[in-house]
Image (tube, rainbow, N blue to C red):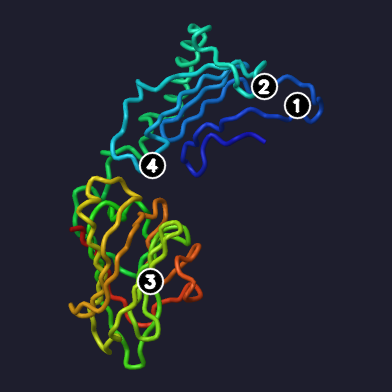
Amino acid sequence: MAFPAAVDGVEQQQLDGVSFLPTFNDPNAPAAHRTQYFEMLGNRAIYHDGWVAAARHEAGVDLMAEKETDFALDRWELYHVAEDFSEARGLAQKYPDKLKELRALFDIEARKNDVYPLGAAFSPGKPSPTSGKQKFIYYPDGPRIPDALIPDIGQSSYRITADVLIPESGAEGVMVSYGDRATGFVWYVKDGHLIYENRAGAQHQVLVSQAQLPRGRAVLAFAFERNESDQNKMVGNTSGTGRLYIDGQLTAQTSLPMMWQARDRPLLLGRSANSPVSEAFVQPFEFTGVLEKVTVELQ
């Protein structure tokens, strides 16, 4: 079956890879896949004809790093995996020309497959639709909100406000959910009370309003005030104070010893999904009042 050059008039990207069909007929058939590049978070490698050259990018391994390091400073390693499968014997100093050859081959493959710029997915200063903005307004009738459209709440104080309408019969359910059982938060109404739950690894806090929600229109808020001593710490090691408000009146407060931003997780409005942050309800636990909008303000 031939791979199509175009589909519905749209030119198709070339199909990469090498067929392993010959191995079905001959288990001793020589490998036809001679070259393979690798890159993730700035860590990179190239395999070619039994040799591997690889460079480990330290900052790329640490997703919480606030500053990127120079890729030119990364140390390249060289292994002859045809004879040393476990890469136990480094040969970079013994065969510098072979290392230079493989590094040049990595550059060719990287440019061919749109790898550059290295580590762009997590590099500080990358283009961002949230960069430089302090206020974000979300509406519940949209799909899940991707990580790229969520402000960096892991490094600042912030306030989340929900404009709601509570019917006379009362309401319950999730207003905002972000993250999962490993890290994140969920903000919801249950038994007439406003509740915020935070998870950061083994840390788990539950903040429950002292007052019950009124009927009719209400403005609900959760505010996080980051400890001043944490201002220079990296994401994932932030602490502070959480407060709940109903129509501007403080109704609960607690210390939050650790706050993590749930990277690569969507923000959900009016319901919960994925691995649940809270065990206090059964998903999706949709909000039964009217959630008009949610505003996030960085402070």
Whether the residues at callouts 2 and 1 have beta carbons within 8 Å, the answer is yes
> Residue at left 22%, top 49%?
231
> Residue at left 59%, top 16%?
89
In the rendering, at what x and y percent does residue 246 appear?
23, 79
Q: Earlier in the sequence, mark 1 or mark 4?
A: 1
Q: Say above or below: 185 vs 74.
A: below
Residue 249 appears left or right of 179: left
Q: Say above or below: 73 vs 124.
A: above
In the rendering, at what x and y percent does residue 272 appear?
44, 69
> Residue at left 46%, top 40%?
10
Q: What's the amino acid at mark 3?
A: Val
| Numbered tag placed on residue 63 in the rendering | 4
| Numbered tag placed on residue 32 in the rendering | 2
Please tell me whether mark 4 or mark 3 is closer to you in this view.
3
Please tell me whether mark 3 or mark 2 is closer to you in this view.
3
Displayed quadrant of residue 127: top left
Residue 21 appears left or right of 154: right
| Numbered tag placed on residue 206 in the rendering | 3
Marks 2/4: CA–CA distance = 36 Å
Displayed quadrant of residue 73: top left
On the image, numbered disc 1 is attached to which residue? Answer: 22
